[in-house]
Amino acid sequence: MRILALDIGEVRVGVAVCDPGERVASPVCVLPAAEVLACAKTFRRVLEDWEPELLLCGLPLTLAGEEGPQAERIRAAAAQISATCGIPHAFADERLSSAAAKRSLREKGLSEKQMRGKVDMIAASMFLQAWLDARRNPEP
């Protein structure tokens, strides 16, 4: 099953996808949040290209594992995107994914300005990969 991960921000949405075998997550692109929420042409093109069966949306949890103040906004946005596009959605813990993405890009020598367009899609691929790994190797 092909899964499309969405790191939904107020301004941008990072997009990542997994292979049909659900083994490897890869970053795809970053789109304006308004275009994703409206299922505009640019986002529809991504959906047509990858044909996902599930949208995996990052849910911002606190370090204690509880839903943070942004979680309600993300839940509403995910429901809107799912309904508009006709693709079911689920949630994944996205705690620290953006920080890990920034660290990874910094290690590759990118400046803050160069990172701006990449962090969200890298974060989406990181929480998608963690979700795939957890499904493949469930803890007892």
Image (cartoon, rainbow, N blue to C red):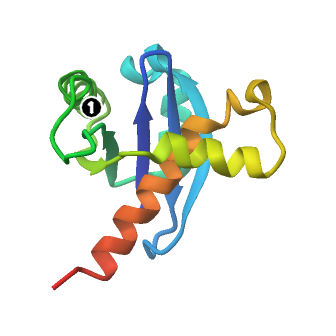
- Residue at image point 79% right, 30% down: 114
Measuring from the top left, give residue 15's x and y in whole percent.
52, 41
Comparing 73 with 98, the one in front is 98
Q: Quadrant of the C terminus?
A: bottom left
Q: Nearer the viewer, residue 16 or 83?
A: 16
Residue at the right extreme of this rendering: 109
Q: Residue at x 42, y 57 (%)?
A: 128
Circle 1: element type: helix
Which residue type does callout 1 highlight? Answer: Ala
Q: Residue at point 27% right, 31% down? A: 78
Pointer 1 local density, CA inside 10 Å: few below 14, some 14–19, many at least 20 = many
Q: Indicate the position of residue 9 as horizontal and vertical percent values.
A: 43, 24
Left of 124 or right of it: where is 112?
right
The residue identified by callout 1 is 78
Q: Quadrant of the N terminus?
A: bottom left
For residue 138, above or below residue 3: below
Name the image quarter holding residue 116.
top right
User: Can you give x and y, in whole percent of width and height, for residue 124 in the image?
Assistant: 48, 46
- Give the farthest residue toward the front: 64
Q: How many marks?
A: 1
- Does residue 48 appear in this view? no
Picture coordinates of residue 56, whole percent (x, y)? 33, 48
Image height of 120 relative to 139, above or below: above
What is the quadrant of residue 86 in the picture?
top left
- Would you say 38 lies left or right of 123 here? left
State whether residue 82 appears in this view.
yes
Q: Please state which of residues 2 and 126 is positioned toward the viewer in this rendering.
A: 126
Q: Residue at x 67, y 36 (%)?
A: 118
